Amino acid sequence: MKLKSLFFAVFLSFVSFSASAEIVNLNKADASALQHYLKGVGEKKALNIVKYRKQHKKFEKIEEIKEVKGIGEKLYKKIKSSLSLTKGVVSAPSKAKAKSKKKVVKKAEQKVKSKKKTKLKKKEDD
């Protein structure tokens, strides 16, 4: 039973750590947030989005992001569900927070592996 609880804790850690689960505010997000939360958007595309937004004041429609250099139909379909014009994150988490979450997940994974090994060893001994 404790093993199930540990698996559940690890699963929740992964879910809360997932970057793609966040909604990004297209009209306010900085380049680091765009890069961090939008899968397929790297530094160059993130900077292009910010540059486009500055030139045009703001995005009127989410589809308008396809006018940004480097954002095609394929990428748009991939990220559109993570975009909003009025709400969502505007900056990426600090590196310290991200590292801390990774450490928690890693420790939980190690505990699960250790318990599995112990359980397997007990079965072998029986």
Image: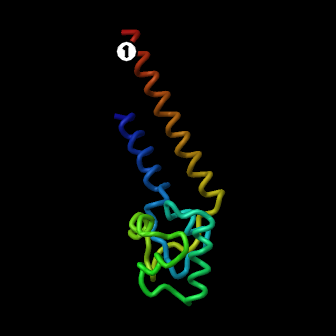
Examine the rendered structure and indicate whether residue 18 appears above or below residue 43: above
Tell me the SS state at disc 1.
Answer: helix
Give the residue furthest to the bottom.
Answer: 57
User: How does the figure colour the protein chain or chains?
Assistant: rainbow
Instruction: Name which residue lies at 46% across and 56% down.
Output: 16
Closest to the observer, 1 or 40:
40
Q: Which quadrant would the C terminus be assigned to in this image?
A: top left
Query: For residue 98, which quarter of the picture?
Result: bottom right
x, y percentage for residue 31? 61, 71
Examine the rendered structure and indicate whether residue 120 appears above or below residue 87: above
x, y percentage for residue 53? 56, 83
Give the residue furthest to the left.
Answer: 1
x, y percentage for residue 67? 49, 79
Q: Which quadrant would the N terminus be assigned to in this image?
A: top left
Give the residue furthest to the right.
Answer: 96
Examine the rendered structure and indicate whether residue 66 appears above or below residue 116: below
Instruction: Name which residue lies at 58% across and 63% down.
Output: 42
Local crowd at mark 1 within 10 Å, few (<14), some, or many (≥20)?
few
Q: How many marks?
A: 1
x, y percentage for residue 80? 40, 70
Query: For residue 49, which quarter of the picture?
Result: bottom right
Instruction: Name which residue lies at 46% across and 33% down.
Output: 112
Instruction: Name which residue lies at 62% across and 72% down.
Output: 47
Please name the amino acid that badge 1 sits on. Answer: Lys
Examine the rendered structure and indicate whether residue 96 appears above or below residue 24: above
Viewed as shown, does residue 51 lie left or right of 115?
right
Closest to the observer, 44 or 91:
44
Q: Which residue is mark 1?
A: 123
Closest to the observer, 43 or 2:
43
Closest to the observer, 13 or 76:
76
